Image (cartoon, helix red, strand yellow):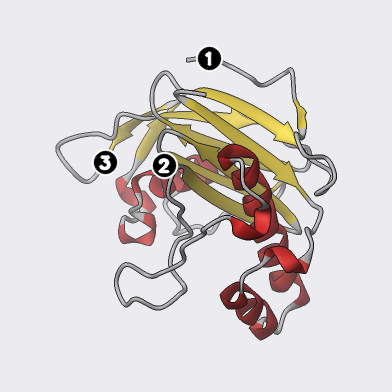
Amino acid sequence: MKNTVQVWVSSAKGPLDWLNPTERERLSRYKSVTAATDFLVGTTLARFALGAWLGVPEAEVPLDRTCERCGAPHGRPRVAGANLSIAHANGTALVAVGDTPVGVDLEPLGRAVPADCGAADLQDWVRKEAALKLTGDGLRIPMQQIGIETDRVVQWPSDELPDIVIRDLDIPGFTAAVAVAPGAVVELRFTTGPDERRGRPDPRISPGA
């Protein structure tokens, strides 16, 4: 699977016994049902995808949420042996797993883009979010300082542009994108739940570089 990224999509919640104690405690603290659902769908889909990638049971996936700044367990999820990116909205999760750096984002179709967010439209927004997730910069770089044309970064707040490719993803009801290294093969897979172990590859979107 060298230079491959698997992008998984699901709206199904996996079983609670896949979660570790830290994740269960975090889930219990959500006051919003929507936020709790997003977290549960995103976390269990991540464990599902990583379990398939690493060849281990979902509950044994060594997800690490340690914050690199303060050491608390609220950081960006990561795991040894794979690159990971998670996004979720309206009860649907998007999880990318690969042997190359990756970033994903999705937003519901029709969502209003804030006038001051630095994105021209919803598509531009998710493309920039995906790029920022791949580089790990997140909110540290304002979107106003980023420019993306077609599938390439053309503006970045440094002399060196990130050498990445952004691809739009065809997900019903959403605008979505994935950022990957040049040459990476992207496999988009839909899964209806934990019993569908391998997912259902979408033949429309399995492009090479």
Q: Nearer the viewer, residue 68 or 151?
A: 68
Q: In this rendering, is residue 116 above or below 84?
A: below
**Badge 2 density bin: few <14, some 14–19, many ≥20, Cα 10 Å:** many
- Residue that badge 3 annotates: 156
Q: Tell me the kind of residue under disc 3.
A: Trp
Asked whether the residues under the numbered discs 3 and 1 touch, taking CB atoms below 8 Å apart as contact, a structural biologist would say: no
Q: In this rendering, is residue 1 above or below 73?
A: above
Of the numbered discs 2 and 3, the one sitting upstream in the chain is 2
Q: Tell me the kind of residue under disc 1.
A: Gly
Q: Position of residue 43 (x, y in %)?
A: 64, 60
Residue shown at 84%/44% (left/top)? 192
Residue shown at 52%/58% (left/top)? 62
Q: Position of residue 188 (x, y in %)?
A: 66, 30
Q: Estimate the spatial distance between the alpha carbons at disc 3 and disc 1, rounded to whole Å.
A: 25 Å
- Residue that badge 1 annotates: 208
Most distant residue in the top direction: 208
- Residue that badge 2 annotates: 131
Q: Secondary structure at mark 1?
A: loop
Q: Residue 135 appears in which quarter of the rendering?
A: top left
Task: Answer left or right for 125 relative to 80.
Answer: right
Q: Position of residue 44 (x, y in %)?
A: 69, 57
